[in-house]
Image (tube, rainbow, N blue to C red):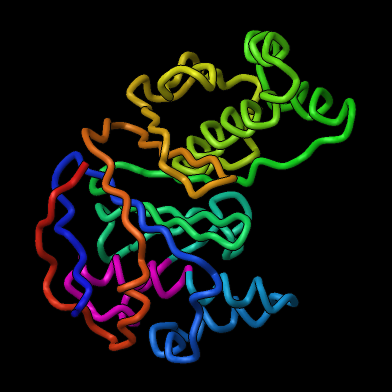
Amino acid sequence: MCAVVPSLLPGVAQVWWARAEEARPGHDALLTPADRARRSRLRRAADRRRSTVAAAVVRLVLGAHAGAEPTALWIDRTCARCGGQHGRPWLPEVPDLQFSVTHSAGWVAVAVFRGCPVGVDVEEVGLFEDGELGSIADQALAPEERAELARLPSEDRARAFTTYWTRKEALVKATGEGLATPLDRLVVSPPAAPARVLRWAGHDDRASLRTLEAPPGLVGALAVVGGTPLRVYEERADELLDQTSRRLPGATTRSQR
Protein backbone atom coordinates (compact mmCIF):
# COMPACT_ATOMS: atom_id res chain seq x y z
CA MET A 1 0.00 0.00 0.00
CA CYS A 2 1.39 3.40 -0.93
CA ALA A 3 2.03 5.93 1.81
CA VAL A 4 0.28 9.26 1.56
CA VAL A 5 0.89 12.63 3.16
CA PRO A 6 -2.30 14.32 4.40
CA SER A 7 -3.06 17.77 3.05
CA LEU A 8 -1.61 20.53 5.20
CA LEU A 9 -4.83 22.23 6.29
CA PRO A 10 -4.96 25.79 7.68
CA GLY A 11 -4.06 25.88 11.35
CA VAL A 12 -2.80 22.29 11.38
CA ALA A 13 0.79 21.36 12.20
CA GLN A 14 2.19 18.00 11.12
CA VAL A 15 4.92 16.15 13.00
CA TRP A 16 6.50 13.08 11.42
CA TRP A 17 8.43 10.64 13.62
CA ALA A 18 11.09 8.26 12.31
CA ARG A 19 13.84 6.05 13.69
CA ALA A 20 17.40 6.47 12.49
CA GLU A 21 17.72 2.71 12.20
CA GLU A 22 15.20 2.81 9.33
CA ALA A 23 17.87 4.25 7.00
CA ARG A 24 18.35 2.16 3.85
CA PRO A 25 20.74 2.54 0.87
CA GLY A 26 17.73 3.27 -1.36
CA HIS A 27 17.05 6.49 0.55
CA ASP A 28 20.13 8.03 -1.05
CA ALA A 29 18.02 8.59 -4.17
CA LEU A 30 16.01 11.12 -2.15
CA LEU A 31 19.07 13.10 -1.07
CA THR A 32 20.69 15.96 -2.94
CA PRO A 33 24.49 16.41 -3.24
CA ALA A 34 24.27 18.99 -0.43
CA ASP A 35 22.48 16.47 1.81
CA ARG A 36 25.11 13.83 1.11
CA ALA A 37 27.96 16.28 1.67
CA ARG A 38 26.52 17.28 5.03
CA ARG A 39 26.16 13.60 5.97
CA SER A 40 29.73 12.81 4.95
CA ARG A 41 31.06 15.22 7.58
CA LEU A 42 29.58 13.07 10.36
CA ARG A 43 32.01 10.56 11.84
CA ARG A 44 29.68 8.15 13.63
CA ALA A 45 27.68 5.66 11.57
CA ALA A 46 24.65 6.25 13.79
CA ASP A 47 24.78 9.97 13.03
CA ARG A 48 25.03 9.30 9.30
CA ARG A 49 21.96 7.05 9.46
CA ARG A 50 20.08 9.73 11.36
CA SER A 51 21.09 12.33 8.78
CA THR A 52 19.86 10.10 5.96
CA VAL A 53 16.48 9.50 7.58
CA ALA A 54 15.99 13.16 8.50
CA ALA A 55 16.79 14.38 4.98
CA ALA A 56 14.60 11.71 3.38
CA VAL A 57 11.57 12.48 5.56
CA VAL A 58 11.99 16.24 5.07
CA ARG A 59 12.11 15.90 1.30
CA LEU A 60 9.26 13.40 1.06
CA VAL A 61 6.91 15.46 3.24
CA LEU A 62 7.82 18.86 1.82
CA GLY A 63 7.79 17.53 -1.73
CA ALA A 64 4.24 16.25 -1.23
CA HIS A 65 3.05 19.58 0.15
CA ALA A 66 4.87 21.65 -2.48
CA GLY A 67 3.86 19.39 -5.37
CA ALA A 68 7.52 18.99 -6.33
CA GLU A 69 10.10 16.27 -6.73
CA PRO A 70 11.80 15.79 -3.33
CA THR A 71 15.26 16.34 -4.78
CA ALA A 72 14.16 19.49 -6.62
CA LEU A 73 13.53 21.39 -3.40
CA TRP A 74 16.15 24.02 -2.60
CA ILE A 75 16.61 24.17 1.17
CA ASP A 76 18.54 27.23 2.29
CA ARG A 77 20.36 27.09 5.64
CA THR A 78 22.20 30.41 5.50
CA CYS A 79 22.90 31.76 8.99
CA ALA A 80 21.73 35.37 9.33
CA ARG A 81 24.67 36.17 11.61
CA CYS A 82 27.67 34.61 9.88
CA GLY A 83 26.48 33.38 6.47
CA GLY A 84 27.37 29.74 7.16
CA GLN A 85 25.08 26.88 6.14
CA HIS A 86 23.89 26.05 9.66
CA GLY A 87 20.99 28.49 10.09
CA ARG A 88 17.27 27.88 10.32
CA PRO A 89 16.29 25.91 7.16
CA TRP A 90 13.64 27.28 4.82
CA LEU A 91 12.39 26.94 1.24
CA PRO A 92 13.07 30.16 -0.75
CA GLU A 93 10.80 28.98 -3.57
CA VAL A 94 7.94 28.01 -1.21
CA PRO A 95 8.43 30.42 1.72
CA ASP A 96 5.03 29.84 3.33
CA LEU A 97 5.87 26.15 3.84
CA GLN A 98 7.73 26.28 7.15
CA PHE A 99 9.48 23.30 8.73
CA SER A 100 11.83 22.25 11.53
CA VAL A 101 13.86 19.13 12.29
CA THR A 102 15.10 17.62 15.55
CA HIS A 103 16.62 14.36 16.75
CA SER A 104 17.51 12.54 19.97
CA ALA A 105 18.25 8.99 21.08
CA GLY A 106 17.90 7.50 17.61
CA TRP A 107 14.64 9.32 16.80
CA VAL A 108 14.00 12.06 14.25
CA ALA A 109 11.02 14.42 14.20
CA VAL A 110 10.08 16.72 11.31
CA ALA A 111 7.47 19.44 11.89
CA VAL A 112 5.65 21.32 9.10
CA PHE A 113 3.30 24.32 9.32
CA ARG A 114 2.05 26.72 6.69
CA GLY A 115 2.35 30.48 6.96
CA CYS A 116 4.23 30.92 10.28
CA PRO A 117 7.65 29.83 11.56
CA VAL A 118 7.60 26.49 13.34
CA GLY A 119 10.11 24.87 15.67
CA VAL A 120 10.28 21.35 17.07
CA ASP A 121 12.51 19.85 19.72
CA VAL A 122 12.77 16.38 21.23
CA GLU A 123 15.13 15.33 24.00
CA GLU A 124 15.87 12.14 25.88
CA VAL A 125 15.23 12.32 29.61
CA GLY A 126 18.74 11.75 30.91
CA LEU A 127 20.39 11.06 34.23
CA PHE A 128 22.12 13.89 36.05
CA GLU A 129 24.90 13.74 38.62
CA ASP A 130 24.36 15.33 42.03
CA GLY A 131 24.40 19.10 41.60
CA GLU A 132 24.59 18.90 37.80
CA LEU A 133 20.92 19.54 37.19
CA GLY A 134 20.88 22.57 39.48
CA SER A 135 23.88 24.06 37.71
CA ILE A 136 22.29 23.65 34.27
CA ALA A 137 18.96 24.96 35.52
CA ASP A 138 20.67 28.12 36.77
CA GLN A 139 21.68 28.88 33.18
CA ALA A 140 18.53 27.78 31.33
CA LEU A 141 15.61 28.56 33.64
CA ALA A 142 14.11 31.78 34.95
CA PRO A 143 13.89 32.24 38.76
CA GLU A 144 10.22 31.19 38.93
CA GLU A 145 10.96 28.10 36.81
CA ARG A 146 13.85 27.12 39.08
CA ALA A 147 11.60 27.53 42.10
CA GLU A 148 8.98 25.29 40.51
CA LEU A 149 11.63 22.67 39.71
CA ALA A 150 12.93 22.74 43.29
CA ARG A 151 9.43 22.01 44.66
CA LEU A 152 9.23 18.72 42.79
CA PRO A 153 10.34 15.36 44.20
CA SER A 154 13.94 14.68 43.20
CA GLU A 155 12.93 11.73 41.01
CA ASP A 156 10.69 13.97 38.90
CA ARG A 157 13.13 16.79 38.29
CA ALA A 158 15.02 15.36 35.30
CA ARG A 159 11.86 14.93 33.25
CA ALA A 160 10.51 18.30 34.38
CA PHE A 161 13.72 20.09 33.41
CA THR A 162 13.75 18.32 30.04
CA THR A 163 10.18 19.49 29.47
CA TYR A 164 11.17 23.09 30.21
CA TRP A 165 14.15 22.75 27.87
CA THR A 166 12.24 21.33 24.90
CA ARG A 167 9.57 24.02 25.16
CA LYS A 168 12.19 26.77 25.09
CA GLU A 169 14.32 25.11 22.42
CA ALA A 170 11.31 24.68 20.13
CA LEU A 171 10.57 28.41 20.46
CA VAL A 172 14.10 29.63 19.70
CA LYS A 173 14.33 27.22 16.78
CA ALA A 174 11.13 28.71 15.35
CA THR A 175 12.61 32.22 15.49
CA GLY A 176 15.98 31.04 14.16
CA GLU A 177 17.79 32.60 17.12
CA GLY A 178 18.81 29.30 18.67
CA LEU A 179 20.77 29.37 21.89
CA ALA A 180 21.86 32.95 21.18
CA THR A 181 18.64 33.77 23.07
CA PRO A 182 19.17 33.84 26.86
CA LEU A 183 16.86 31.02 27.92
CA ASP A 184 16.47 32.39 31.43
CA ARG A 185 14.62 35.39 29.94
CA LEU A 186 12.07 33.15 28.25
CA VAL A 187 9.45 31.87 30.68
CA VAL A 188 7.15 28.96 29.85
CA SER A 189 4.46 27.14 31.80
CA PRO A 190 5.37 24.48 34.41
CA PRO A 191 5.82 20.95 33.04
CA ALA A 192 2.58 19.67 34.58
CA ALA A 193 0.57 22.46 32.92
CA PRO A 194 -0.43 22.79 29.25
CA ALA A 195 2.46 24.18 27.24
CA ARG A 196 2.37 27.96 26.72
CA VAL A 197 4.58 31.02 26.77
CA LEU A 198 4.25 33.10 29.94
CA ARG A 199 6.81 35.81 29.22
CA TRP A 200 9.16 36.50 26.31
CA ALA A 201 10.15 40.15 26.01
CA GLY A 202 10.46 41.50 22.48
CA HIS A 203 8.69 38.62 20.75
CA ASP A 204 5.29 38.08 19.23
CA ASP A 205 2.65 37.62 21.92
CA ARG A 206 1.04 34.94 19.76
CA ALA A 207 3.95 32.52 20.07
CA SER A 208 2.34 29.21 20.99
CA LEU A 209 3.44 25.83 22.27
CA ARG A 210 2.16 22.26 22.13
CA THR A 211 3.38 19.16 23.94
CA LEU A 212 4.08 16.24 21.61
CA GLU A 213 3.33 12.55 22.09
CA ALA A 214 6.99 11.59 22.06
CA PRO A 215 8.23 7.97 22.16
CA PRO A 216 8.94 6.46 25.60
CA GLY A 217 11.87 8.06 27.38
CA LEU A 218 11.67 11.24 25.28
CA VAL A 219 9.99 14.63 25.68
CA GLY A 220 8.93 16.76 22.72
CA ALA A 221 7.50 20.22 22.07
CA LEU A 222 6.22 22.13 19.04
CA ALA A 223 6.28 25.93 18.73
CA VAL A 224 4.66 28.29 16.23
CA VAL A 225 5.56 31.99 16.23
CA GLY A 226 2.97 34.42 14.90
CA GLY A 227 0.07 32.00 14.91
CA THR A 228 -1.61 29.20 16.81
CA PRO A 229 -1.88 25.61 15.56
CA LEU A 230 -5.45 24.52 16.14
CA ARG A 231 -4.51 20.87 15.81
CA VAL A 232 -1.33 18.81 15.75
CA TYR A 233 -1.21 15.72 13.54
CA GLU A 234 1.50 13.25 14.59
CA GLU A 235 2.40 10.28 12.41
CA ARG A 236 5.14 7.68 12.04
CA ALA A 237 7.08 8.00 8.79
CA ASP A 238 7.68 4.27 8.35
CA GLU A 239 5.53 3.96 5.24
CA LEU A 240 7.07 7.06 3.69
CA LEU A 241 10.56 5.63 4.18
CA ASP A 242 9.49 2.26 2.80
CA GLN A 243 8.56 4.05 -0.38
CA THR A 244 11.85 4.80 -2.09
CA SER A 245 10.46 6.24 -5.31
CA ARG A 246 11.28 9.91 -5.83
CA ARG A 247 7.70 11.12 -5.91
CA LEU A 248 4.72 10.53 -3.63
CA PRO A 249 1.14 10.24 -4.84
CA GLY A 250 -0.95 13.38 -4.44
CA ALA A 251 -1.64 14.36 -0.86
CA THR A 252 -4.97 13.23 0.55
CA THR A 253 -6.79 14.34 3.63
CA ARG A 254 -7.02 12.05 6.63
CA SER A 255 -8.43 12.68 10.10
CA GLN A 256 -6.17 15.01 12.05
CA ARG A 257 -5.89 15.64 15.76
Quarter occupied by the N terminus: bottom left
Q: How many marks?
A: 0
The furthest residue to the right = 130
Residue 247, position as x, y percentages in the image? 23, 83
Find residue 27 and report its image quarter. bottom left
What residue appears at the point 48 percent right and 68 percent down from the top-left corner? 54
Image quadrant containing the C terminus: top left
What residue appears at the point 50 percent right and 66 percent down from the top-left corner? 19
Up-down relation of residue 205 to residue 112 (above or below): above
Q: Looking at the image, which is closer to me, 204 or 143?
A: 143
Residue 191 appears left or right of 243? right
Q: Position of residue 46 (x, y in %)?
A: 66, 73
In the image, which residues are magenta? 54-75
Q: In x, y percent, where is residue 245? A: 28, 88
Residue drawn at point x = 48 percent, y = 35 percent: 171
The answer to whether residue 66 is left or right of residue 46 is left
Q: Is residue 74 magenta?
A: yes
Give coordinates of residue 214: x percent, y percent: 47, 45
Which of 149 and 113 lies nearest the eye of the viewer? Answer: 149
Q: Is the stretch drawn in magenta largely helix, strand or loop?
A: helix
